Image (cartoon, rainbow, N blue to C red):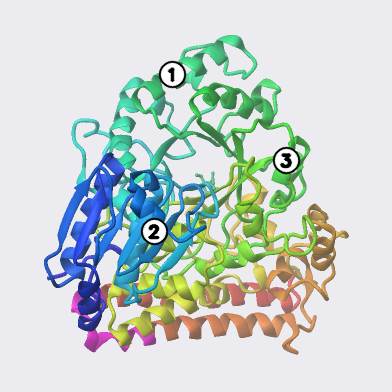
């Protein structure tokens, strides 16, 4: 009996169909895997677990130091564990780069190999996915390598067990029990991550508690690392830049002070003595109250390079966030570029600047951050938000893959046409650069991990797109749907409908035409365009929508804040001109008169009403589509999803009503 609580995520290993199970069982009679390490053992265990339900015959599983050719077998081993005869049978040019994998048919057998054990791990999960999704496993010739080197989940988990912007219960990490008690969920989390290629996890919130660097907590983190290591996942810690003063008792945290540097050196040595594969530090500096080098008259390069030097002997990296705003800038959207662009070329080779996908803060839609393609001498990581802080949180079903594809496919023109963000981040040919994508996790202690049975789709899509940003949204949706929900066509149809249409619905009922940051103060759930709370102007919706009797939207053109000129010329010109600015970004860049005619032929005022109404209808359609699955599904799963979709539909109506009644008053002449 399969579980229905969502715990197994996309790894429930339900057979696709009887006929496919028969085919697979006829091909795979024996399994030979390589012995030798924690990762290879994890692979063998996973294969054993999966095949016990994906095959209908008894199969032999043998673990050996070296793997040799056998007929009707699945052979799984890194290249240096294959015997000479098997190596000689490999077709030419079929080995992957780095941590990639090859899955190759050799006569009537199948070989999963790679240059590293991690490659074999990822290849094995990919192979299991072929079986889960009912794909043919004949004549295989698959070679695949990750597009970016670092594929990291950022947990905004506090040490008291709460999760900032978390909507799925408490933190997964049970700090009070660690290091003595190891929750079995650590392993299941790591399996799920490895199955989609994630290779890093930052355990704690970027708004830090300094004692994460105390000896006690380093030992707790080491216990988690000892589980994750089996699945190729390295841990990182978010650190407070002022730790030498706040934890170490020094009078300063000035990055140029020799005692401060010595403190970091000793702390780093202590960490590596118990976590030899520690990934490095993530730092939120000089941002939203977190201390940074500015306090000491130093800049972001001084601060991050000091940590880079300390981590360098161990192969660790610094991930330094560019989420800064505040003093000295008329437009919050411009601040990170203004501060970081002049530092391009000044960061050490193991320092990576982590930039949110858009210039403000994980809105339902934002144009790309101008630092992508704006700093070509710096390692740039992209930060995406998987947890839906501004997109209905744990209540709205919104599949984020279409948004992330739009971001990755955006052409920055940094090196002429075709300089997409995805190709910039991947930079496969550019071996000198460290590349990475981080995702703010949506994972918590809820049985289903992510607040609903649908929310894990975003965790899944994140990993898949980090590995291969050329995958289409449909491909990712298809994979997740079958692996999670099984092969019932009616259920699949509804699941995919929701996945493919939910982001557009959310955009329409929340922030049409790129309105942004009009959510309620602080918790960011629900509409509040009139909100005047908050100690800073750039936390208030009015700062962003700028509604008045003349029109709506933020003028970031050359006549306004000139944010457009932070982009490369053809893009800057395109955004600057209201006629060429894509309508999907219109109110981000322009203060548009109420009677301005859009491509639909409707005025702005009419369009706003039209799109909000459309959004409500789309939310209703998501719910109605789900109703069709009632005869096909167990009550528990059917109702748990329906409950969320009902909330989403009600919320969509609230968004429409609140926003239209507020904005249309201005259209009717209110100042
Ligand atoms: C972790 C936004 C969020 C904060 C978050 C911050 C950040 O402001 O609302 O919760 O803090 O971004 O990314 O640092």
Split into 4 quadrants, where in the image is the C terminus? bottom right
**Residue 628 colored in magenta in the image:** yes
Left or right: 201, with 559 as reference point: left
Question: CA separation, marks 2 and 1?
Answer: 46 Å
Disc 1 crowd, CA 10 A, few/some/many (<14, 14-19, 20+):
some
For label 2, the residue is: 89
Note whether ligand 1 is within 8 Å of mark 3.
no
Using the image as rendered, state which of residue 340 and residue 434 is in the foreground.
Answer: 434
Left or right: 385, with 662 as reference point: left
Q: Mark 2 or mark 1: name the one nearer the start of the chain.
A: 2
Q: How many labels does the image show?
A: 3
Q: Can residue 535 be seen in this view?
A: yes
Instruction: Find residue 194 and report its horizontal and vertical position in percent.
Output: 36, 52
Instruction: Find residue 140 and report its horizontal and vertical position in percent.
Output: 40, 69
Quadrant in which residue 611 is drawn: bottom right
For label 3, the residue is: 377
Q: Which residue is drawn at 32% across and 64% down?
A: 110
For label 1, the residue is: 269
């Amino acid at each position: 009996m399969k579980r229905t609580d969502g715990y197994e995520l996309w790894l429930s290993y339900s057979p696709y169909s009887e006929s496919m199970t028969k085919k697979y069982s006829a091909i795979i009679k024996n399994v030979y895997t390589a012995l030798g390490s924690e990762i290879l053992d994890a692979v063998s265990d996973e294969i054993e677990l999966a095949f016990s339900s994906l095959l209908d015959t008894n199969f032999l599983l043998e673990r050996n130091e070296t793997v040799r050719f056998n007929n009707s077998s699945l052979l799984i081993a890194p290249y240096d564990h294959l015997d000479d005869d098997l190596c000689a049978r490999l077709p030419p040019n079929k080995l992957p780069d780095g941590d990639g994998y090859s899955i190759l048919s050799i006569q009537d057998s199948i070989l999963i190999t790679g240059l590293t054990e991690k490659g074999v791990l990822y290849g094995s999960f990919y192979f299991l996915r072929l079986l889960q999704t009912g794909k043919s496993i004949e004549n295989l010739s698959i070679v695949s390598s990750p597009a970016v080197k670092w594929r990291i989940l950022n947990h905004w988990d506090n040490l008291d067990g709460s999760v900032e912007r978390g909507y799925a219960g408490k933190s997964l990490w049970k700090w009070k029990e660690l290091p003595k008690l190891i929750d079995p969920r650590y392993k299941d989390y790591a399996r799920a991550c490895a199955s989609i290629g994630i290779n890093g996890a930052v355990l704690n919130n970027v708004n830090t508690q300094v004692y994460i660097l105390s000896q006690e907590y380093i030992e707790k983190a080491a216990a988690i690392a000892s589980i994750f290591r089996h699945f190729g996942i390295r841990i990182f810690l978010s650190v407070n830049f002022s730790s030498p003063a706040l934890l170490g008792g020094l009078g300063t945290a000035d990055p140029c002070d020799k005692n401060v540097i010595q403190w970091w050196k000793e702390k780093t040595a202590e960490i590596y003595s118990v976590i030899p594969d520690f990934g490095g530090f993530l730092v939120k500096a000089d941002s939203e109250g977190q201390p940074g080098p500015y306090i000491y008259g130093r800049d972001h390069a001084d601060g991050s390079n000091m940590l880079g030097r300390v981590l360098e002997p161990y192969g660790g990296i610094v991930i330094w966030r560019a989420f800064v705003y505040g003093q000295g800038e008329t437009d919050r959207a411009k601040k990170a570029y203004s501060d970081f662009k002049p530092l391009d070329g000044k960061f050490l080779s193991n320092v990576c600047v982590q930039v949110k996908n858009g210039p403000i803060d994980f809105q339902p839609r934002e144009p790309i951050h101008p630092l992508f393609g704006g700093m070509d001498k710096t390692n740039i990581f992209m930060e995406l938000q998987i947890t839906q802080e501004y997109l209905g949180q744990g209540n709205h079903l919104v599949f984020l893959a279409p948004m992330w594809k739009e971001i990755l496919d955006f052409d920055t023109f940094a090196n002429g046409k075709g300089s997409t963000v995805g190709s910039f981040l991947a930079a496969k040919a550019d071996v000198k650069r460290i590349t990475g994508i981080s995702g703010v996790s949506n994972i918590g202690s809820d049985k289903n991990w992510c607040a609903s049975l649908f929310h894990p789709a975003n965790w899944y899509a994140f990993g898949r797109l980090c590995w291969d940003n050329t995958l289409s949204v449909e491909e990712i949706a298809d994979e997740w749907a079958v692996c999670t929900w099984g092969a019932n066509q009616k259920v699949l149809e509804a699941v995919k409908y929701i996945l493919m249409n939910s982001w557009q619905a959310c955009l329409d009922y929340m922030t049409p035409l790129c309105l942004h940051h009009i959510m309620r103060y602080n918790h960011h759930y629900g509409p509040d365009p009139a909100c005047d709370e908050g100690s800073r102007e750039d936390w208030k919706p009015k700062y962003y929508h700028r509604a008045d009797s003349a029109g709506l939207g933020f003028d970031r053109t050359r006549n306004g804040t000139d944010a457009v000129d932070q982009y490369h010329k053809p893009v800057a010109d395109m955004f600057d001109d209201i006629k060429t600015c894509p309508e999907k970004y219109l109110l981000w860049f322009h203060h548009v008169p109420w009677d301005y005619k859009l491509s639909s032929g409707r005025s702005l005022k009419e369009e706003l009403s039209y799109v909000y109404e459309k959004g409500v209808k789309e939310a209703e359609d998501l719910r109605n589509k789900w109703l069709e699955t009632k005869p096909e599904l167990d009550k528990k799963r059917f109702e748990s999803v329906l409950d969320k979709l009902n909330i989403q539909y009600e919320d969509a109506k609230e968004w429409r009503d609140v926003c239209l009644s507020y904005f249309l008053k201005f259209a009717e002449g209110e100042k």
